[in-house]
């Protein structure tokens, strides 16, 4: 679905009526040199706390552009509390996971190193930038948190006791994900393995954890990035269903 053509920017500053914001060098360069917008152009701003606000570029300086805020366009509202834990893959495909997970409403992104993880290097700043850009383009009011990578044992050891962790079980022993999602709240997490799947000892470790639930995504073998999108798509589809009549 395509949205408005008005540029949206995520900012750290508090947003309020009749205030002027000075953008940092990178965002100023983006507006003035990349997008080539001139003074007087309308934009939208959000910070994950104060909703979305109208703004006008009042000073198109390429190093420190200024924006004058107008009225609030949308109030802040609660968003689903869904986590995605995934094994990093090749750079462009990890970027894809971050982008699509942001579009599909994930609140927290957690890279996880497993025995078969394809890479042990994660560009934390790049992942954050990808999440921010995807939030700007998808009209979200928040940007998901991107956590520093952890190992699978660390993830399980520190997993919250009040959050279900749904792992995609390539062995075929899990129940269909749609069936599982019909009985879950927003406080959930998904765990997606690397290319080649989890190692046998990892599957045993996951299955023994008190908060894990095995789920199945169907008969076909999916790439890791496809599994992320498929799982989150099922969650969103279930979440969008109208309430059942008594």
Image (cartoon, rainbow, N blue to C red):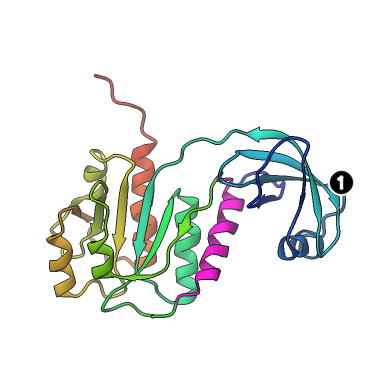
Farthest top residue in view: 246
Where does residue 166 sit, x and y in percent of width and height? 25, 54
Residue 154, relative to residue 166: is it above or below? Answer: below
Left or right, residue 237 beside residue 200 = right
Is 179 situated left or right of 234 in this image?
left
Looking at the image, is 44 positioned above or below residue 132? above
Name the side, left or right, on which 189 lies relative to 141: left
Picture coordinates of residue 223 (x, y %)? Answer: 34, 68
The reply to whether the magenta stretch includes residue 138 is: yes
* Residue found at x 47% / y 62%: 98
The answer to which of 214 and 78 lies nearer the viewer is 78
Q: Where is residue 159 in the image (x, y as percent from the top left)?
A: 26, 57
Q: How many labels does the image show?
A: 1
The residue at 22%/43% (across/down) is: 179
Of helix, strand and loop, which one carries label 1?
A: loop
Q: How crowded is mark 1: few (under 14 residues within 10 Å), some or many (20 or more)?
A: some
Residue highlighted by disc 1 = 40
Q: In which quarter of the image is the C terminus?
A: top left
For the stretch drawn in magenta, the main secondary structure is helix
Magenta residues span 122-141
Image spot of residue 143 (x, y percent): 53, 52
Q: Is 162 or 175 nearer to us in this picture?
A: 162
Which of 100 and 107 lies nearest the eye of the viewer?
A: 107
Question: Residue 158 magenta-drawn?
Answer: no
Residue in the image at 29% along x and 60% along y:
191
């Amino acid at each position: 679905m395509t949205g408005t053509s008005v540029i949206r920017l995520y900012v750290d500053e508090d947003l309020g009526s009749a205030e002027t914001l000075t953008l940092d060098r990178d965002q100023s360069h983006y507006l003035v040199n990349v997008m080539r917008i001139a003074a007087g152009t309308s934009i939208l701003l959000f910070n994950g706390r104060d909703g979305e606000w109208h703004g006008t570029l009042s000073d198109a300086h390429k190093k420190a552009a200024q924006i004058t805020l107008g009225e609030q366009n949308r109030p802040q509202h609660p968003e689903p509390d869904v986590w995605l834990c995934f094994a990093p893959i090749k750079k462009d495909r990890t970027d894809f996971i971050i982008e699509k997970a942001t579009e599909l409403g994930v609140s927290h992104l957690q890279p996880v190193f497993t025995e078969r993880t394809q890479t042990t290097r994660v560009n934390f700043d790049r992942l954050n930038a990808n999440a921010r850009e995807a939030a700007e383009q998808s009209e979200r009011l928040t940007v998901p948190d991107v956590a520093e990578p952890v190992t699978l044992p660390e993830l399980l050891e520190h997993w919250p006791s009040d959050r279900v962790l749904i792992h995609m079980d390539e062995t075929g022993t899990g129940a269909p994900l749609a069936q599982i999602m019909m009985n879950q709240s927003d406080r959930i997490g998904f765990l997606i393995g690397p290319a080649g799947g989890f190692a046998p000892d990892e599957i045993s470790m996951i299955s023994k954890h008190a908060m894990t639930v095995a789920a199945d995504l169907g008969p076909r073998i999916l790439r890791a990035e496809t599994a992320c999108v498929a799982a989150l798509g099922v969650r969103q589809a279930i979440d969008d269903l109208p309430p059942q009549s008594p």
